[in-house]
Amino acid sequence: MQDYVFTDGTAADSVERKFAQDLDTADEVIVYAKLPRGPRGFYIPTPVGNYSPDWAISFKKGSVKHIFFIAETKGSMQSTKFGQMSRTDEIEKAKISCAKKLFNEISTSGVKYHDVDSYQTLLQVMETL
């Protein structure tokens, strides 16, 4: 356990940095973790390579619909147009798709996975599930 988070974005206004700041100040969040990457980190094997979601979040019971949430933070929720995606983007998109399918299969009523671009989007997604 650490008192700080290493985010993927280094800019002061990066998506992950803003997401972490919002998690840190949210009254409904009990604890959150930026899931570690790499061989000792948390990952899900997929047909196109290992996938590591970004966040695990635990909420106060009764404050939101779901108690535990696994989140993938992306700068944009819009799909990249066909023909403009790099091979790396295509692979990452395929990994996320596999992770969604896996989490949908193993999720319980209290544990959910979703990709989001902000903490506000996370709250909106939880209201619709």
Image: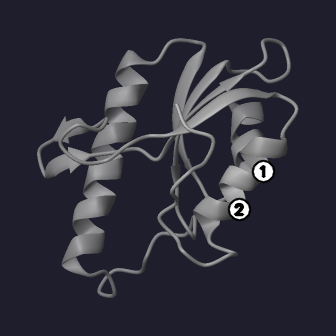
30 sits to left or right of 38: right
How many numbered circles are shown? 2
Q: Toward the viewer: 113 or 37?
A: 37
Inter-mark Cα distance, 2 to 1 = 6 Å
Q: Which residue is mark 2?
A: 18
Q: Toward the viewer: 90 or 1?
A: 1
Q: Toward the viewer: 26 or 100?
A: 26
3 sits to left or right of 70: right
Q: Which residue is mark 1?
A: 22
Q: Toward the viewer: 26 or 51?
A: 26
> Callout 2: 10 Å neighbours few (<14), some, many (20+)?
some
Q: Secondary structure at mark 1?
A: helix
Q: Residue 23: horizontal and vertical position, in percent?
A: 73, 43
Amino acid type at mark 2? Lys
Q: Residue 99: horizontal and vertical position, in percent?
A: 33, 39
Q: Is residue 7 above or below residue 103?
A: below
- Residue drawn at the location 33% of the way across and 60% of the way down: 93
| Picture quadrant where residue 15 is located | bottom right
Q: Secondary structure at mark 2?
A: helix
Q: Is residue 123 above or below residue 28?
A: below
Q: Residue 91: horizontal and vertical position, in percent?
A: 22, 63
- Residue drawn at the location 30% of the way across and 72% of the way down: 89
Location of the C terminus (image quadrant): top right
Amino acid type at mark 1? Asp
| Picture quadrant where residue 43 is located | top left
Q: Is residue 91 above or below residue 57?
A: below
- Residue drawn at the location 19% of the way across and 76% of the way down: 87
Q: Residue 124: horizontal and vertical position, in percent?
A: 77, 43
- Residue drawn at the location 56% of the way across and 50% of the way down: 5
Residues tagged 2 and 1 counted as in contact (Cβ below 8 A):
yes
